[in-house]
Image (cartoon, grey):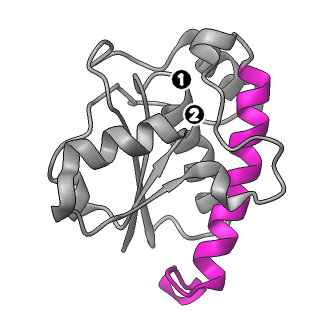
Amino acid sequence: MYRVLFVCLGNICRSPMAEAVFRERVARAGLSGAIEIDSAGTGDWHLGKPPHEGTRRILDAQGISYEGMLARGVRPEDGERFDLLVAMDESNVKAIREALGAKTRAEVVRFLSFVPDARLTDVPDPYYTGDFEETYALISEASDRLLAHLLETGKVTAAAR
């Protein structure tokens, strides 16, 4: 089982959107049994709350479930439990490294690093920009590319279904 944790600031907009979209892509590929997916935030303002209304609205429009998702914070054990920590922006990368320290075994990457031709390096936070459509488009493409990367590198295999 390969484990992926998506991380943003409050865990109500970007990372739950990424969790839901990536989970949908993984299920469509028939790999739900091979990849565990979760999300968390580096801040504690929204702990226990469901995804933001804007995130829910766009996921509903796409027919993607977010059922049961509630905001949680990054935990020290996440660095050992997960194989890949996917940060939405550079400030999340720094916060993850500060929270987990040097003892993490997980790889920490920015989500848009899987989209080398993207015009941006960070997924903009729609909590501040209000542009959930742009965030969805970036997360959607990065999710496709992340899944392709995991298959191409052999971190996940089609045989693991």
Q: Amino acid at mark 1?
A: Cys
Dot 1, crowdedness within 10 Å: few (<14), some or many (≥20)? Answer: many
In the displayed structure, 158 sits above or below 42; it is below
* Residue name at image x 62 percent, y 80 percent: 151
Relative image position of residue 92 (x, y in whole percent): 43, 38
Q: Quadrant of residue 122?
A: top right
In the displayed structure, 112 sits above or below 88; it is below
Q: Nearer the viewer, residue 1 or 97?
A: 97
Relative image position of residue 59 (x, y in whole percent): 66, 28
Question: Per the image, is 158 magenta?
Answer: yes
In the displayed structure, 19 sits above or below 80; it is above
Q: Taking 139 as reference, is 76 left or right?
A: left
Q: Alpha carbon of mark 2 to alpha carbon of mark 1: how far?
A: 6 Å
The mark tally for this picture is 2
Relative image position of residue 61 (x, y in whole percent): 76, 24
Q: Secondary structure at mark 2?
A: helix
Which image quarter is the N terminus in?
A: bottom left
* Residue name at image x 49 percent, y 81 percent: 155
Dot 2, crowdedness within 10 Å: few (<14), some or many (≥20)? Answer: many
> Can I make out residue 7 in this image?
no
* Residue name at image x 35 percent, y 26 percent: 70
Q: Which residue carries the number 1 mark?
A: 13
> Can I make out residue 77 in this image?
yes
Relative image position of residue 25 (x, y in whole percent): 66, 56
* Residue name at image x 78 percent, y 24 percent: 133
Which residues make up the magenta segment?
Answer: 132-161
Q: Which residue carries the number 2 mark?
A: 17
Question: Per the image, is 5 magenta?
Answer: no
Q: Nearer the viewer, residue 130 or 120?
A: 120
Question: Is there CB contact under 8 Å for labels 2 and 1?
Answer: yes
Q: Amino acid at mark 2?
A: Met
